[in-house]
Amino acid sequence: MTRPRRFVPTLCAFLLILTSCRTIPVEVTMVPGVKGGYAWGKAYHIPPETTTDESGYFGLCEGKNGRIYVGTAAYGRNAYLVEFDPDTEKMRIVIDAHEVVGLPLTPTGYAAQSKIHTRNFVGPSGTIYVGTKQGYATAAEKESGNIPTYRGGYVLTYDPKTETARNLGMPMPWGDPRLPDGSTEGEGVIDVVADEARGLIYVITCEHEYWMVYDMKQPEQGYRVLGPILRDQPNTLIDKRGR
């Protein structure tokens, strides 16, 4: 009997699928109960146009449709959410961040939405919640001293049922009076969690780790700061009661 697939992120831009019926050995992770401590697997390369430095972490989830969604980093250019269908072994881009938010599709350097590195959250509806963040200034930008201003990251959603992506705005843009004095850029987004039953989205920004909430029933209120600044790259956990 074929065992259910297991999906394991690697340290570069590959998607590793572990299953008992594959024939390609991949010595990446120890698997308890498996002879020799390793499982058989197959690695799939994320589309090269969606990443620059083969960088990827956090941004991997399985949707309710059984497909895998991977956030990528294309430094200085854009960020993407890639969908992988394990049945057809095909990948496609379902979120082009710059296209969704209306930014230039040509490289803009440090000003770009360079990463989707949130722990991508799948709501009960099947909607996937992600956020974009800043990358790194290039050597040329640093040498010239002309580093474009990063204006802040966005919260984005993707609905696999309708195949539509939405832009829910910037939680903490550059120039926001809530930013610390002397801030030279807006905040990126490092974590997004949704309480769909109550219509709330919890967001954590970076680099100052603001903990915020967005009411989907009252979007005109924007993102409200909830409490103290948190530690580096935290994430919000909620139970089924919304606590």
Image (cartoon, rainbow, N blue to C red):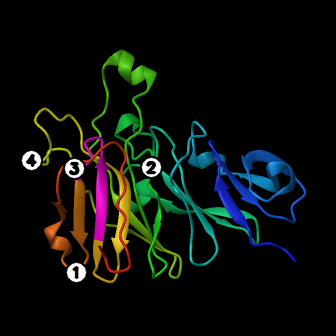
Q: Which residue is rendered at x = 20% and y = 34% of the image? A: 184
Residue underneath mark 1: 217
Q: From the viewer's perspective, is the residue at label 2 or at label 3 nearer?
A: 3
**Between discs 4 and 2, the one toward the N terminus:** 2
Mark 3: amino acid: Pro
Q: From the viewer's perspective, is the residue at label 1 or at label 2 nearer?
A: 1
243 versus 22 height, above or below: below
Magenta-tinted stretch: 201-210
Q: Quadrant of residue 85?
A: bottom right
**Between discs 1 and 2, the one toward the N terminus:** 2
Determine which of the numbered discs, if any, sits on residue 177 in the image. Answer: 4
Query: Residue 217 location, x and y as percent?
Result: 22, 80
Residue 202 among those drawn in magenta? yes
* Horizontal side, residue 11 vs residue 171: left or right: right
Query: Residue 9 location, x and y as percent?
Result: 63, 52
Query: Residue 239 location, x and y as percent?
Result: 37, 74
Query: Residue 129 location, x and y as percent?
Result: 42, 66
Residue underneath mark 3: 173
Residue 11 among those drawn in magenta? no
Q: Secondary structure at mark 4?
A: loop
Q: Quadrant of residue 139?
A: top left
Q: From the viewer's perspective, is the residue at label 4 or at label 2 nearer?
A: 4
Residue underneath mark 2: 105
**Between discs 1 and 4, the one toward the N terminus:** 4
Mark 1: amino acid: Lys
* Horizontal side, residue 36 vs residue 54: left or right: right
* Horizontal side, residue 94 vs residue 27: left or right: left
Mark 2: amino acid: Leu
